[in-house]
Amino acid sequence: MSFPIGAKLIGVGSAVPVNVVTNADIEKLVDTSDEWIKTRTGISQRYVVKDDETAAGLATEAARDAIAFAGIDPTLIDLIIVATSTPDNLYPSTACMVQAQIGAKNAAAFDLEAACTGIIYALSVAQQFIATGMNKTVLVVGVDIHSRFLNWEDRNTCILFGDGAGAFIVQASDENEILATYLRADGSGGHLLSIPNYGTMFPHEGTTQPEASHGFLHMNGKAIYEFAVNAVPEAVRTTCVKAGIEVADIDFMVPHQANQRIIKSAAEKLGLKPEQIVSNVAEYGNTSAASIPIAFSDAVKSGQVKPSSLMVLVGFGGGLTWGAAVLKWTATDKRSKTTGTKS
Ligand SMILES: CC(C)(COP(=O)(O)OP(=O)(O)OC[C@H]1O[C@@H](n2cnc3c(N)ncnc32)[C@H](O)[C@@H]1OP(=O)(O)O)[C@@H](O)C(=O)NCCC(=O)NCCS
């Protein structure tokens, strides 16, 4: 694909709550075991917010990490897109709260909701705004706090999710490095993964207790599993065709971190080796819209992914939605090595 104005990633960052919830902690809440959770999902622990932590707070921390990586002044940012399905409020948007907190006084800001695929959607939207000349420097954040919408008595769902935020800085460039993006949706499968009871279909009933108006996350695990193991390879293959490359040209795949079995199955179908897969689901669980940038950020900071790598980022989730992005990663951390650590 060719674009009137090119775009590239110049920064990546992440943030998670301090509080760790291990599988042993969950054993105390529901009838499950560390062994079952690890075998079926690959997850060992996840980070979960405490009472005073917010989506905007985590998003701001991840944004600051990415801004420091890129070595830019926040006033350079002219658009902020926050992908989230668990915003702090219906409005103000989480993006506007981040804009104020990082001092990005020249930026427009809006939220985008495409569940766990949100970060891929947001990256694609950022590229389109850059390609048309509308914006030059875009902050893209994925943040989710699913722990507030989990039924901690439902072992089918409460074992899977963690909270967190991840961010990218996308900038206009003479050399286009976001080679292709691909976005899909199938609303007929919306009931398979949903948080009902949080919109205008379910108006507030006069209580001031948030719990009373919040719905729980509902999921048909088997159906989502089947959807994911097909959607991921399809999205990767299609996006590679759009980018004019072969799957075999890919150096690393950063998949949505939902379940290690889904990741492994997709990698095998695509013929990618285990060392080409970025996976941190064991440590974080499924952090929804944040999972891809958190995994990307960790892989860059650990040295697994080095500059000049050809990457495919691939997501799937509620909606149903799925999609992928093929890009070159050439950025280096503008901080000194002593301060450029994982946040
Ligand atoms: C949820 C998931 C881990 C379940 O794994 P699975 O191998 O499909 O397990 P099943 O649904 O077949 O359940 C097997 C049994 O384990 C039980 N089980 C479910 N959760 C359990 C838990 N946490 N601990 C112990 N047993 C559990 C089930 O009740 C079932 O028992 P039954 O056979 O007596 O009915 C898996 O389907 C999955 O990961 N799906 C995708 C979910 C996802 O990615 N969602 C987010 C998308 S963005």
Image: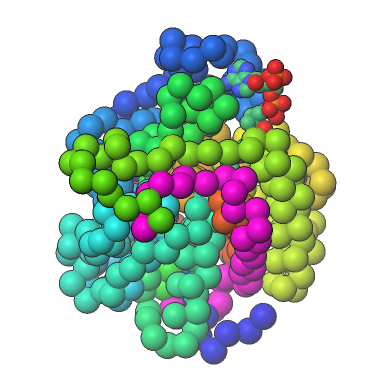
Residue 294 on image: x %, y %: 46, 45
Tell me the quadrant of the picture where the N terminus can be found: bottom right
Residues 317 and 332: in front is 317
Q: Residue at x 70, y 72 (%)?
A: 243
The stretch drawn in magenta includes residue 189: yes
Q: Quadrant of residue 324?
A: bottom right
- Whether residue 222 is visible here, answered yes or no, is yes
Q: Residue at x 72, y 73 (%)?
A: 242
Tell me the quadrant of the picture where the C terminus can be found: top left
Q: Residue at x 70, y 41 (%)?
A: 223
Question: Is residue 313 rendered to the left or right of residue 264?
Answer: left
Question: Is residue 16 rendered to the left or right of residue 60?
Answer: right
Q: Which residues are magenta?
A: 172-200
Residue 80 on image: x %, y %: 33, 67
Report the colour scheme: rainbow
The quarter of the rendering in which ligand 1 is drawn is top right
The stretch drawn in magenta includes residue 280: no
Q: Quadrant of residue 41?
A: top right
How many numbered marks appear?
0
Residue 177 on image: x %, y %: 56, 71
Q: Is residue 260 above or below residue 272?
A: above
Q: Residue at x 76, y 39 (%)?
A: 265
Q: Is residue 103 above or below residue 15?
A: below
- Whether residue 334 is visible here, answered yes or no, is no
Q: Is residue 58 above or below residue 242?
A: above
